[in-house]
Image (cartoon, rainbow, N blue to C red):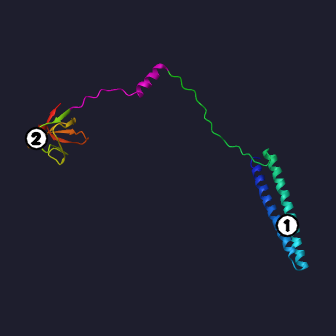
Amino acid sequence: MDIIAPIALLGAIAAGIAAGFMLWTSQNAVRAGRGALFHTERQVAHDRAVRARLTALALGGVAVVFLIINVITSGSAGVAIIPTATLTRTPRPAPSMTTATREAIVATLMPTATPTPPLATAIVVNAGEPGLRLRQAPNGQEIDYLKDGTVLELLPEPQIKTDDGIIWQKVRDPQGRVGWVATAYIANQ
């Protein structure tokens, strides 16, 4: 029964449109009959107008019948109301939790503060001009020159001694660049 109301409404609309079209056709037939020169032409136009009006009347009756069916099956005055499902969220009760369980969850979720060791730093000394070379690797390609007084962060990599006897330390400069410097030109702070 739920499908009958919308179908009846669509049928009523279609029949109403067709009835309107037939009325328009009958008016055109009447106009054609007025302009006819011969009696036979007028008679044909008159017959066409009468048929179109009768057809419009019949289609209007069909539209009314469909509207009545729509009203009876849907319970409204010509408008089919189709119920739609709506989603609702049902709140769930919170699970009961013991104090020990709650503390365990909080302890798991809360970050623990672990003391970080202070960063070891050194300062560039006695580098001269143009400054201490910051290199990509021990005895590697130069990145930049560091002036005397530049504070460097000593990285926790082991120092490397090259064949030429220079000891190298991996560092980070104030601009965040990482490289290697000769330890002879840095002093721990």
Disc ID at residue 166: 2
**Residue 121 as seen in the image, left or right of residue 8:** left
Instruction: Please say if 28 is above or below 133.
Output: below
**Residue 151 as seen in the image, left or right of residue 9:** left
Residue 147 drawn at (x, y percent): 17, 41
Disc ID at residue 7: none
Instruction: Please say if 115 is above or below 13.
Output: above
Disc ID at residue 52: 1
Q: Secondary structure at mark 1?
A: helix
The disc, 1 or 2, on the residue closer to the chain's N-terminal end is 1
Q: For marks 1 and 2, give the CA distance.
A: 113 Å
Disc 1 vs disc 2: Cβ atoms closer than 8 Å? no
Q: Residue at x 34, y 26 (%)?
A: 113
Q: Residue at x 82, y 67 (%)?
A: 25
Q: How many marks?
A: 2
The segment highlighted magenta reads: 98-120
